[in-house]
């Protein structure tokens, strides 16, 4: 499993949370977090960031893009989606865009468009939220207790 993200995490409290969930998830699966360089110039950001994201995606990856326009799932449905894709021997790849979103090329490469909410979240916080939901999915899949 991998998470491709645009930009680096600058805030220590976000890095600490990400590290904590990384440790928890590693009990269940190998996880790679791939950060691609973000662009400050909005006029080229989507194109350049999109190219960088696509260069990290392999042909046999099952790509889930995080998009506000995507489908919302419950935690149980999300756990089932992760389990189903692992059983199909696909490399599960999540993509979190940068401040300007995702390019059309990345959206077109997506196998599944997922939304956590109609709200807009900072991508640093969203990385923590995604990792928490991945961890929760493994707890659900393994019938292990986890807080609600």
Image: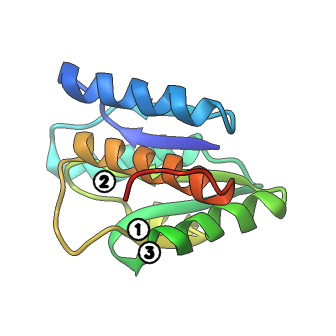
Identify the residue at image location x=48%, y=45%. Answer: 53
Q: Is 15 in front, or is 80?
A: 80
From the viewer's perspective, is residue 13 above or below residue 132? above
From the viewer's perspective, is residue 84 above or below residue 44? below
Q: Nearer the viewer, mark 1 or mark 3?
A: 3
In what element is the residue under mark 1? helix
CB within 8 Å, label 2 to label 3: no
**Mark 2 surroundings: few (<14), some (14-19) or many (≥20) residues within 10 A:** many
Q: CA distance from mark 2 to mark 1?
A: 8 Å
Q: Nearer the viewer, mark 2 or mark 3?
A: 3
Where does residue 119 sit, x and y in percent of width and height? 17, 69
Where does residue 87 sit, x and y in percent of width and height? 82, 61
In what element is the residue under mark 2? helix
Identify the residue at image location x=33%, y=49%. Answer: 129
The answer to which of marks 2 and 3 sits earlier in the sequence is 2
Mark seen at residue 9: none
Where does residue 147 sit, x and y in percent of width and height? 39, 52
Identify the residue at image location x=65%, y=31%. Answer: 27
**Where, by quadrant of the figure, is residue 82 drawn?**
bottom right
CB within 8 Å, label 2 to label 1: yes
The answer to which of marks 1 and 3 sits earlier in the sequence is 3
Query: Disc 2 designates what residue?
Result: 46
Q: Is residue 66 left or right of residue 2?
A: left
Q: CA distance from mark 2 to mark 3?
A: 29 Å
Identify the residue at image location x=66%, y=53%. Answer: 92
Q: Is 148 in front, or is 23?
A: 148
Q: CA distance from mark 1 to mark 3?
A: 26 Å
Query: Disc 1 designates what residue?
Result: 104
Query: Disc 3 designates what residue?
Result: 74
Q: Is residue 135 left or right of residue 86?
A: left
**Mark 1 surroundings: few (<14), some (14-19) or many (≥20) residues within 10 A:** few
The answer to which of marks 2 and 1 sits earlier in the sequence is 2
């Amino acid at each position: 499993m991998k998470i491709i993200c645009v930009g680096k995490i600058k805030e220590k409290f976000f890095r600490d949370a990400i590290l904590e969930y990384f440790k928890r998830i590693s009990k269940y699966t190998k996880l790679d977090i791939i950060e691609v360089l973000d662009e400050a110039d909005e006029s080229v950001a989507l194109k350049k960031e999109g190219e960088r994201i696509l260069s990290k995606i392999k042909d046999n990856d099952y790509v889930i893009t995080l998009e506000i326009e995507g489908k919302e799932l419950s935690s149980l449905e999300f756990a089932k989606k992760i389990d189903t894709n692992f059983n199909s021997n696909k490399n599960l790849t999540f993509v979190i865009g940068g401040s300007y979103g995702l390019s059309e090329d990345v959206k077109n490469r997506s196998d599944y468009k997922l939304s956590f909410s109609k709200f807009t979240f900072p991508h640093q916080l969203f990385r923590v939220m995604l990792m928490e939901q991945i961890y929760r999915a493994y707890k659900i899949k393994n019938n292990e207790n986890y807080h609600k």
